[in-house]
Image (spheres, grey):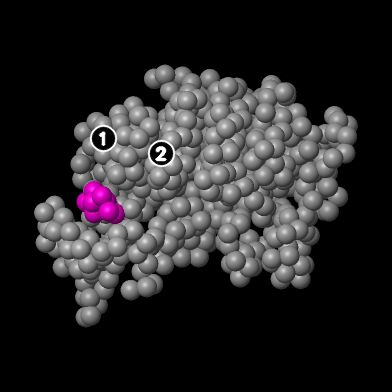
Amino acid sequence: MIEKLRYEKLYDSLNQDNKLIHVGLLLERAFKNWPENIAVIADDQSITYQELYYQANLFAKKLLGLGIKKGDRVIILYPNSIDFYIAYFGLWVIGAIAIPLNTFLIEKEVLKIIEDAEPHCLIIPNDFLDKFKELNNLDIAIVSRVFEKDILSIDNVITPANRDIEDIAAILYTSGTTGFPKGVMLTSKNIIINAIQGISRFESSYKDRIFCPLPLFHALPQNTCVWATTIMGATAITISRIDRHAILNGLKHNPTVIMAVPAIYGLFCKMKSIDFGYIRYFFSGGDVLSDKIRGYFELIYRRKLCNGYGLTETSPFISVDIDDYTQSTNNIGYLFFGLECQIRDSNMNILDKNQVGILWLKGDNIMKGYYNLPELTQEVLKDGWFNTGDLAYINQDGKIVLSGREKDLIKSKGIKIYPQEIENILLTHDKVIQAAVIGKKSSDMDEEYPVAYIASHTPDQEKLKKELSELARKNLAAYKLPKNFIIKRELPLTSTGKVDKKRLKSEL
């Protein structure tokens, strides 16, 4: 009830002429309400909402001068920086569509996304242009300079383009663990609704400093450190590199909330002596949080780590469990206010509580669709409901419990095997850092069997394999037992910190 009241109050504050404002007005609203508040701290640089507002408007003028207009698609290929924010909000001021790209992609991958997105402009720093020389041969406008040292004043402010809240505001390309990255189209409504859903759950305010040590092209920092902070007048803390030194540098700015993926909390566990004195919430999302990492983190720091769930297609938040820390990390809590869910079988029948099926969602934060992929959009969006592709069930308390990805499901003699269940068992071994279970086809291609990839620094791999085999036999039915254990010092990760199962599968 309290979360609902917070949501409704914030929603009302974002209404103008009895309708929700569009994203092009968010920065102007922050400028009017909190001009002197620090908007962004990027490494050791900072900018207030007033300065960001003037810079974004000045950049918007530059874009208009290049012929960029309302509805045009523009790629931002910039590392985490104040320039990223100026470019992003400058695009929204003129009503253009922001497409922040993964800065870790190689040139071939960037060119493929450019071919798909058909952008009207590319915003990219000079050092990236030197690395991606083919981009200079493209027939699109390229902008390299974002920040201006000119005297900034109200004279440079332009009237934001008038856009409908159902218009596309951003296209976020997925990390592509199940194939070529898909362009997820998010509207102003999707973005604003999910941001205020998160603010309402976390009880955030203009006093917060939110630190998300992830690349800004990722949906999690987009929401928490671009959209939500601007709606609240809060401060976003971001870093241009993700390593121990950069993270410690970010922490010296006294964040009140940390939003990160499990791999970052694993790094915190290795660092062991961090002062988290100012922080009121630690949130983990973007990948499966293991009981092992959460257990170590809470043991070392005596602080609670709350677990959440979301997808790029849902802008991205769906649920966060901030109340009950005794549950397994598969338990991701109650849905955000305004969302509905159903658990369905493969025939679209709605299942009862405690029955595992595919999680379907409905709400105003659900994407408009995939760019240039109408058939795939129709597959996952049906009558306003979105197929997450994740397996889950609803427990007796009404909370969602995840069982894994539908695409990761292994089938042996017609029986379903959930990789996450096996991974959770293997992760209880003290020599296991990461575990990833994938299915390998049998020689006759009739069925699959589980293979376990293990990240470990043990010098005796054969001993570890025997111990893991014994551990699995004690805790799992025979048909779930991995037929092979492959030990590596580290497992390949995507740019957002997830284990790259697609790459592992290609190695088999």
Point out the residue furthest to the bottom here: 444
Q: In this view, does 416 lie above or below 353?
A: below
Q: Residue at x 88, y 39 (%)?
A: 150
Confirm or deny contact between disc 1 and disc 2 (CB under 8 A): no
Q: What element carries label 1?
A: loop
- What amino acid type is highlighted by mark number 2? Lys
Nearest the camera: 30 or 488? 488
Classified by dominant secondary structure, the portion drawn in magenta counts as loop
Horizontally, residue 172 falls left or right of residue 45, namely: left
**Numbered disc in front, either 1 or 2:** 2
Q: In which quarter of the image is the C terminus?
A: bottom left
Q: Distance between the residues labelled 1 and 2?
A: 24 Å
The magenta-colored residue range is 425-432
- Quarter assignment of residue 362: top left
Horizontally, residue 391 falls left or right of residue 270, namely: left
> Is residue 478 covered in magenta?
no
Q: Quadrant of the N terminus?
A: top left
The image shows a total of numbered marks equal to: 2
> Is residue 431 covered in magenta?
yes
- Quarter assignment of residue 353: top left
Q: In this view, does 90 lie above or below 106?
A: above
| Residue, disc 2 | 272
| Residue, disc 1 | 327
Percent across and percent down for residue 100 are: 62, 51
Percent across and percent down for residue 272 are: 41, 39
- What amino acid type is highlighted by mark number 1? Gln
* Crowd rating for badge 2 (residues with CA inside 10 Å; few <14, some 14–19, many 20+): few
